[in-house]
Amino acid sequence: MAPAVDTLRLTAEEAIGLVERGELSPAELHGAYLEAIAERNDELHAYLRTVGAGEGASIPIAIKDVISTRGVETTAGSKILSGYVPVFDSTVAARCKEAGLTLLGKTNTDEFAMGSSTENSAWGPSRNPWDPMLVPGGSGGGTAAAVSAGMAPWGLGSDTGGSIKQPSALCGNVGLRPTYGTVSRYGVVAFASSLDQVGPVAKTVRDVALLYSIIAGRDPRDSTTVELPELVLLPKDERLDGLRIGVPSQVASLDAIEPGVRAAFEHALRLAEELGAVVDECDLPLSYRYGMPCYYLIAPAEASSNLARYDGVRYGPRTDAATYREMVERTRDQGFGAEPKRRIMIGTYALSAGYYDAFYGQAQKVRTLLIREHREALTHVDVIASPTSPTVAFPIGDKAADPLAMYACDVLTIPSNLAGLPGLSIPCGLSEGLPVGLQLVGPQFGENTLFRAGHALEQAIGFDTVPLRWRE
Amino acid sequence: MAISKEEVLHVARLARLALTEDEIGRLTEELGEILDAVGIVAELDLADVPPTSHPLDVVNVWDEDEPRDSLSLEDVFANAPAREGDLFRVPPTA
């Protein structure tokens, strides 16, 4: 008889230990997760499809549906890729396989990772394990819900404006958006190439660090990748002596931050001080005012170019028509949902003759200022702290009809993404019974600092990652 | 800023999107609102600021020019909606 495994509590590190000590076979472990999926996925719709354990099953992993997996349908949450079965693995999927990880299934995402709630998925929204009436965040709400609901020990997401950090915050997980260039984008469905980064989601900072060490590093197939300047260290320290934490002064006056979120954030700062950290103010005025507008010009501009490839010629469903041009236009109108169309239109407009300098060119210059501003702040402090999301999880349907309200979800995650910096979200408490995320941003390649700070705070906070409704 | 229906149609043509009448109406309104919100970047005088296209200081990467295996034709066409021999089949261009 296999020992009972509580997948709601089991960390990836513990799962690896059970298998290494022979207390559980890889097939039994995989089976335990498939059972959890059978029990909870109908309600939560975290997975779009699952994969049988097969031969040589090992430590399981969930992978977001924008990441190509050879032989397993990959739709990026879009009808325009329905039925698309990659004939090659993305580098991150290949590295997971080489490390002995087995794919559990592909997780739901807003279409082309464009959204903050998964409501833009062509296949319907995922739901938050803490309360299924609420969104799990987005775009990587599927991976976040799967990890939170014990349907995977860990998973991969992708983060352009906050798609790993924000759903991690809303579901009570730990999520890392790595430094731009540290993780290969080869085989990852492109949204905005100067911003997209793949990263890990798990229940603990140590699991996130371990998965990051598996996927990170230069890939000859992605010329924007670099070697990590230092090895990934699994954090152990529980003190933060000497760590300088900067809180942007703009956080205090950001009305969008809910009182309960602010309270949990401030509690985490007090704990950091008790652990020996020095909490100080820093200043990111341009980032807070212009980050969102800058992002919503640059990302759609890049998206409009990246999504030009969906033309009904080489893959995806085609809508037939008498001429080539009509076929392309109709295929795209029928294949793309409302949000990708909106972004293609904004991006095409911002790049078009007569508007390029005023919109796209100006946004690229603003980006330079945001990079400088972050660099300056990080000369005074080691990490920048803020809430990850201004709010806790919100009801499905609440913002779906208001694009600008949805875009505002990313106000706190976007600035450091534009600057190419790593950001770690860890759960720091509850507000109205729902998880609140703490975002820690570090300098380029500062992942080890984030892991160290995140781990020490995680121990001090003692957050229980099991959703309240499932606790014994 | 107000966007006209003609501008929306022009951009849709550039983007190869055959939008329906409903979509054109909705997008005309939404694009105006979104461009209002993002257009505040114009407030800044950035004449002396260089643009950023990439957040890392990357240098060109050179690789040896060695032939390697590529995908088989069966793999290349595995997801194609229409194939004719070793070509993707599409409707006439005019």
Image: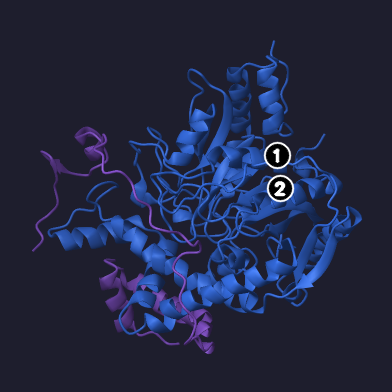
Name the residue beneath numbered marker 2.
A451
Residue at image point 35% right, 48% down: A81
A365 horizontally vs A468: left or right: left
Q: Secondary structure at mark 2?
A: helix
Residue B25 can be seen, yes or no: no
Say which quarter of the image contains residue A278: bottom right
Colour assignment, chain B: purple
- Kindly give the residue lying farthest to the top in the view shown: A1
Q: How far across and how far down the image is residue A407, in percent?
A: 56, 68
Precedes in sequence: disc 2 or disc 1: 1
Q: Up-down: is A108 above or below B37? A: above
Q: Secondary structure at mark 1?
A: loop
Q: Amino acid at mark 2?
A: Phe
Say which quarter of the image contains residue A166: bottom right
Q: Amino acid at mark 1?
A: Leu
Query: Callout 1: 10 Å neighbours few (<14), some, many (20+)?
Result: some
Residue at image point 45% right, 75% down: B51
Which chain is mark 1 on? A
Query: Callout 2: 10 Å neighbours few (<14), some, many (20+)?
Result: many
Q: How far across and how far down the image is residue A412, in percent?
A: 65, 66
Q: Residue A234 — which label?
A: 1
- Kindly give the residue lying farthest to the right in the view shown: A274
A402 horizontally vs A362: left or right: right
Colour assignment, chain A: blue
**Quadrant placement of the N terminus of chain A:** top right
